[in-house]
Image: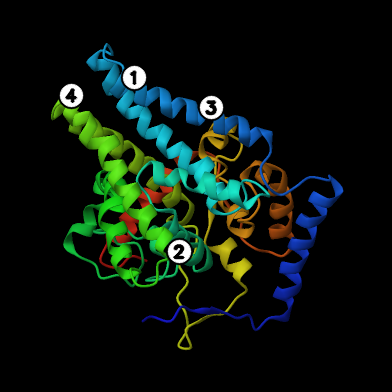
Amino acid sequence: MQNNPKFRSREKGEITTVQTLKNRVNDYFKTNNIKMNGNWYLYHKTIILLVLAVAHYFFLVLFPFTPMWVKAILCVSSGLVAALIGFNLMHDGGHGSYSKKQWVNELMGYSLNLVGGILFFWKEKHNVTHHTFTNIRNVDKDIEIPFMRIHEEDTRHWYHRYQHYYWVFLYGLSYISWITTQDFEKYFKYFRTMPAKEHFIFWFTKLGYLWVFILYPVWKFGSIALLGYLLFAYVCGLTISIVFQLAHVVPQVAMPVPNSENTIEQKWEIHQVRTTANFATHNKFLYWCLGGLNFQIEHHLFPRISHVHYPQIQKIVKDWCKEFKLPYTHFRSMGRAVQAHIIYLKLMGRKCAF
C-alpha cells in the first residue's frame, strides 16, 4: 500500500504566515457575529434546485404529453440541475459546512446518492485524498482521468497529443464511469471494512437509481429513453469535470512532487494556494450556480466554511497572499480558465511538456 506524503516546512516563518491568515478569517466571523456554515441564501437555493429536479423528472418521465423536442432539452437541463445540486447541496453537506447540525449536513450530503453516487466513497476520495494531497500524482484521484496525461511524470502515449481535443468527450463520460466502474471498485476494495449501514445504502442507492433513471423510463418509453439518459449523463459529467479541472489543471498552478523522504517541503496551507486557481469570481450568476466552486482557493484553505461566505473572505485571502508574496491565481472569466486548461493539456500531450 502506498504511503501518503507528509507536509513539513523548514521555514519557521511559514507557521506565522499561516496562523496570520487563520486569525484574520476567524476575526471576520467574530467581528460580524456570523456563523461559518450556510444561511438562508443557501436554504433558498436548496429549495429552488430540488423543485427544479422534481419538475424535470415529472415532465420527462411522469407527464405523458411532453413533446419529444422538449424532452431533449429537458435531458440537457436535467444534467445541469444534477450537477448544480452536487455543487451546492451535496458539496457543502459533504464538507460539513452546510449547517451547524451534523444530521442536516449528512442529509444534504446524501443528495449525491439521489443521482447514483455514494457519499461514503466521495468523502474518502474528495475530502481525504483530494483536499489533503491536492495535485500530488497517484494520490489525488480527483484530477485523474483515464487516457489523459495530467502530470509531467505520467507516461506519454501517442494519443495524448490529441487530448486537448478529445477531453470534451472523456469528461462527459466521467459521470457514468464514476457511478459504475469506480464505485464498484471501491465497494469491493472496502467491502470488509464498510459498516453494515453503508452496505445497505450502497445497494439501495444503486438499485434505486437503476430503476428510477433507467429501467422505469425504458419500460415506459422504450429504448429511446436510453438516449435521453446518456444525454443527461454526458452533460452532468462534462459540467462537473470541467469545473474541478479548471481549478487545478492549468499551467499557472503547481504539481508538486514529494522528495526522496516522501515529503512536501511546505505547510499544507501554502501547498493549497500554490496548487489551486480561481475563475470568474465577479460573476454572480456563475457563483450562484457553482456553489462558490469558482472560489477554489478560499474553499481549499477553508473547506469547513460554507461557500456563501467566500466572496467576503476572498479579500482577506488575496491581501494575505500579497503580503506574504504567495501566488493567487485568478482567471477573470471562465472562458479564460478553459483556454488555460486546453493549453495545459496540449503541453502535456507533447513529448517534452516543459
C-alpha separation, residue under disc 3 versus residue under disc 4: 28 Å
Crowd class of label 3 (few under 14; some 14 to 19; many from 20; radius 10 Å): few
> Image point 59% across, 40% down: which residue?
281
The secondary element bearing badge 3 is classed as helix
Q: Are marks 3 and 1 in contact (CB under 8 Å)?
A: no
Q: Which amino acid does label 2 sit on?
A: Glu
> Image point 53% across, 52% down: which residue?
94
Q: Is 12 above or below relative to 69?
A: below
Looking at marks 3 and 4 on the same chain, the residue that comes earlier in the sequence is marked by 3
Nearest the viewer among 232 and 294 is 232
Which residue carries the number 4 mark? 221
Q: Where is residue 291 in the image (x, y as percent from the top left)?
A: 55, 40
Is residue 74 shown left or right of residue 10? Answer: left
Q: Are marks 1 and 4 in contact (CB under 8 Å)?
A: no
Q: Which amino acid does label 1 sit on?
A: Phe
Q: Where is residue 64 in the image (x, y as percent from the top left)?
A: 26, 14
Nearest the viewer among 164 and 12 is 12
Marks 4 and 2: which is nearer the front? 4
Q: Where is residue 73 in the image (x, y as percent from the top left)?
A: 31, 22
Q: Which amino acid does label 3 sit on?
A: Ile
Which residue carries the number 2 mark? 124
Looking at the rendered image, the quarter that the C terminus falls into is bottom left
Nearest the viewer among 343 and 236 is 236
> Image point 39% across, 70% down: which residue?
137
Which residue carries the number 1 mark? 59
